[in-house]
Amino acid sequence: MATTATPVHTTQWTRKDLLGLRELSAEEIHLILQTAESLREISLRPIKKVPALRGKTVVNLFFEPSTRTRTSFELAAKRLSADIVNIAAQSSSLSKGETVLDMVKNLEAFKVNFLVIRHAAAGVPHLIARHATSAVINAGDGAHEHPTQALLDAFTIKEKKGRIEGLNVSIIGDIAHSRVARSNIWGLTKLGAHVTVCGPPTLMPPAIEQLGVRVTYKVEDAIKGADVLMLLRIQHERQEHMLIPSLREYRLRYGIDAQRLKGAKPDVLIMHPGPVNRGVELESSVADGPYSVILDQVTNGLAVRMAVLYLLSGNQKDEEGLLHA
Amino acid sequence: MPKLLLKGGHVMDPANKRDGAFDVLIDDGKIADVQPAMAANGAQTLQVKGLLVTPGFVDLHTHLREPGREDKETIETGCQAALRGGFTTICAMPNTTPAIDQRGIVDLIQREAQRLNLARVAVVGAVTKGREGKELTDFGELFDAGCIGLSDDGAPVADAFLMRRGLEYAKLFGRPLIQHAEEPALFGQGVMHEGLVSTTLGLAGIPSESESIMVARDIALAALTGGWVHFAHLSSASSVDLIRQAKRRGLRVTCEVTPHHLALTEDVVGEFNTTAKVNPPLRTEADRQALIEGLRDGTIDCIATDHAPHTDWEKSADFDAAPFGISGLETALAVCAEVLVKPGLLTWSQLIEKLTVKPATIAQLPAGTLSVGAAADLTIIDPQAAWTIEPKSFVSKGRHTPFAGRTVTGKVVKTLVGGVERLA
């Protein structure tokens, strides 16, 4: 049984990579959250920097455009004194015979320590991790996982509610195509939350209930009794693939506005991984309203990513030690 | 060529209902006699005691990649892999570059196969020009050139009108259209079976209905036209049911199943294992059981490998980007023995039937039999030999298989084509 109440953790971090939350134990997740807790205050200092990762090199290798996740990893690395390189790689630039692995081998030839990977295809970080000596961090792979997002979500819930175990968390939106939904399902269920997923049947993947979640198509059911409402971004392209008739239809059925929110608990949290489609999944007044913790999520993301870099670095060989021996 | 006597073996020749201790005499590249015990009488003798002596296997579904993608496979390496797997006749699928859509390309493949003189190569021509699904190829020219059937394999003949006309016109030649049954709109961008594993991995799924809807449509078209449709590589329980009903109605419908669909399920994809990426995809345990039952009750006529070699660098891409296909020729027998014979689902003799006379009948080739006068194409099997599947030792250029590392029982020890040992 997962327990969240006790902050006493003797778990050691032993993994080379952070690829997803599916394979993590509740103890490992707690360890990351606890580490993030202690690193968070660095960003509140006048001089926002500690030397923990001095001399280490982090590569942000993003095959998909991203502003907030990339920036969050970049600042996390910098506040730990690592050197960071940003690569905005187009998947198309790999079409001339160069493979993702070729590119990674070239980067590793520069003796880097961390590869932070985002890619539109599921499993790319896993493929890279099998071939790379660097620590690989999954910053979002297709519709598979986005572990640091789910970690920062858990961190935020715990910060606001004091616990995760026993809470009702409803994830609403495009579950089928969401890596955020999958990572949160793994993370939150391991930590003892009751997770409901909600969306139109066309955006609900088959057999999702076998992951230990409640499924509902009715947003009112998802709102009622929920401690946390986690909204997902609706991509405009879903309309083109006939997954929803129109964005308007979606807003009318699933958009969270002040009226719908009346059915929620008085202390409900509104979360969103961003960027928000204002006027589609979330009315502006709700996104900016008193229940919204969307900007806290961004702040906490920094602490969580610092924690992940820090823990993974602890498991790397101390090259300096070798030099000075 | 001196006469050759295969002595002391257990002959399994389902075409002639032979299953027991027989010697086989080969003369001038042909089967000269099959008798319980024969004296050598000057013939060279090969002791095959404890071994199974069967007709050479016939594969209805082999991708040789030549012309066009000789980096994936050549006719030469493909034929060598065939011999290693006990196949003496393989049917080359037409999704080459250019596609096998005219006589010149059929001739090119046959000339190269004759020059190599390894396994026999029969050719499957394309149904439509360039396999584009728009215009029928010149069926008569392709059949005159020796094609055993026509297929746009790799892609379905999606257009119902074109399929109707193709089935009708092919009646003139009494040969099948081989359908890669897949409804494109339902297939979408799918990369594996749609179910719990695809949901967990966030991969786009391919529902079973993508196949069975096309199977249902083509059964209806076979009924309409009286034409012969052969379904390639069945993967789903619903397709098996449809074909069972169609056969009961007396329609001209045949089909095949691959060793990997008989042996594996979606679970093998594990964590993005691209060696298990294949089209049609590996499906559920219920589907696998239905395929086995279909093979047992005769709904499924035969086993075909769908040998689909690719380069290592292509298969080591991410799951979405990696091509579909498994290198299957060298593992087919052992996988089938493991999955079908070992648990008692088929006897050795029944398995050999599905690898020899059954596919030969569909291809209308004089193969898959040890009848006196037939070409002396034989496979000699050690049914007890245990070995470990090691892709690095494949002679095929395609070294990707989800069976890598498995220990299996049953090994091809010799393959004879026209009475000559091609695999030592």
Image: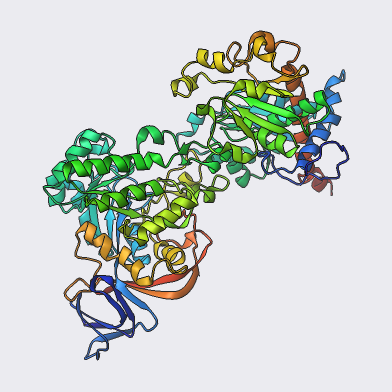
Q: Is residue B327 above or below residue A47?
A: below
In the displayed orientation, state which residue is furthest to the top: A285
Residue B288 seen anywhere in this rendered image of the structure: yes
Residue at (63, 40) in percent of width and height: A211
Residue A117 seen anywhere in this rendered image of the structure: no
Horizontal relation, residue B277 to residue B28: left or right: right
Q: How many marks?
A: 0
Looking at the picture, how far across and down is residue A276, in whole percent? 63, 16
Horizontal relation, residue B364 to residue A49: left or right: left
Looking at the picture, how far across and down is residue A231, in whole percent? 64, 21
Quarter of the picture containing the C terminus of chain B is: bottom left
Between A184 and B47, the one lying in front of the other is A184
Looking at the picture, how far across and down is residue B59, in whole percent? 30, 59
Looking at the picture, how far across and down is residue A119, in whole percent? 57, 32
Name the image quarter holding residue A27. top right
Color scheme of the displayed model: rainbow
Q: Is residue B290 above or below residue B131?
A: below
Name the image quarter holding residue A78. top right
Quarter of the picture containing the N terminus of chain B is: bottom left
Between A98 and A227, the one lying in front of the other is A227
Q: Is residue A241 above or below residue B386?
A: above
